[in-house]
Amino acid sequence: MIKFSCLIVDDEPAAHFVLQNYIERIDKLDLAGSCYNVTDAINFLHQQPVDLIFLDINMPELTGFDLLRTLRHPPKVILTTAYSEFALESYEYGALDYLLKPIAFSRFLKSIDRFVETQPQEKVEQVNSITSENTFLHLKVDSGIIKINLDDILYTQSMGNYVKVFTSSQSYLATITTIELEKRLPSPRFVRVHKSYIVAVDKIEKYNSQTITIADAQLPVGITYRRELAEILK
């Protein structure tokens, strides 16, 4: 499967956890490797080129800037740091963006959009055509990151900053909002039918203008969503 390959270079395990989680939530990205110092990153890149590096600046022995000075033809770089004073210097090294820790997911998405805009249109189209066929969804739950087959999802229910995902075998409480989840579920395979509910269209057993029935569960249909749902179910 073709995606944009990424490398994380950071000496903090917590930073790896956050970035790995964010990368897994973007269909276009693939985490090729994780390095905790510049020397390991150089060795990795000699063996396996990548499209994008998430690079910390302050690391023991060698800094992120040292890595950029070493590489003759570096890939695109998004700098990740807790220190704002390096911002001006970062652009002298051709950094694509500069993310201050703690990194918000919304800010991360803007960086990825900026990165994609720099890529050749042919590759963007190729990546988009492949990733649109993804069959799995990665979600963060209490136990960590889980992988759910899209075919198993029946519907989801909003619970504030969490979403309960109901599958054919069990349910999961995921750390995500319904708005974020809606963006990650392929349309028209999944459709919003209420401010609190997203349903798998092929799992709908009964339908009227007021309710939907899926696996013996009766879900409400919001007034603002009725016309779109009716069009899909024609």
Image: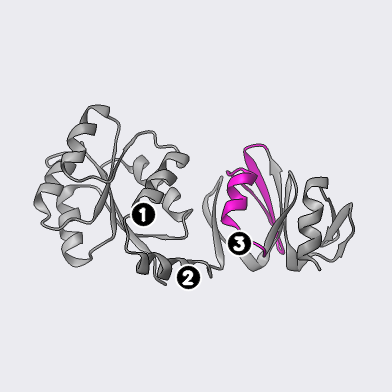
Report the Cα–Cα distance between label 1 and label 2: 16 Å
Q: Quadrant of the C terminus?
A: bottom right
**Image depth: mark 1 or mark 2 in front:** 1
2 and 117: which is toward the camera: 117
Is residue 164 shown in magenta? Answer: yes
Q: Please, is residue 45 above or below residue 36 in the view?
A: below
Label 1 or label 2, whichever comes before in sequence order: 1
Q: Residue at x 42, y 72 (%)?
A: 1
What mark, if any, has residue 186 been given in the picture? Answer: 3
Amino acid type indicated by mark 3: Pro
Q: State the separation of the CA atoms marked 3 and 2.
A: 13 Å
Q: Position of residue 182 (x, y in %)?
A: 62, 52
Is 43 positioned to the left or the right of 227 in the image? Answer: left
- The earlier-in-sequence mark between 1 and 3 is 1
Residue under pointer 2: 129
Confirm or deny contact between disc 3 and disc 2 (CB under 8 A). no
* Relative side of 166 to 207, left or right: left
Q: Considering the numbered disc 1 on the image, is that residue within a helix, a strand or a loop? A: helix
Q: Within 10 angstroms of label 2, few (less than 14), some, or many (20 or more) residues?
A: few
User: Circle 3: is it few (<14), some (14-19), or many (20+) Cα within 10 Å?
Assistant: some
Dividing the picture into quadrants, the one containing residue 61 is top left
> Disc 1 designates what residue?
117
Report which quarter residue 217 is drawn in.
Answer: bottom right
Residue 145 within the segment the image draws in magenta: no
Amino acid at pointer 1? Glu
Q: Residue at x 20, y 47 (%)?
A: 37
Magenta highlight range: 160-188
Any part of residue 59 in sight:
no
Q: Nearer the viewer, mark 3 or mark 2?
A: 2
Q: Amino acid at mark 2?
A: Ser
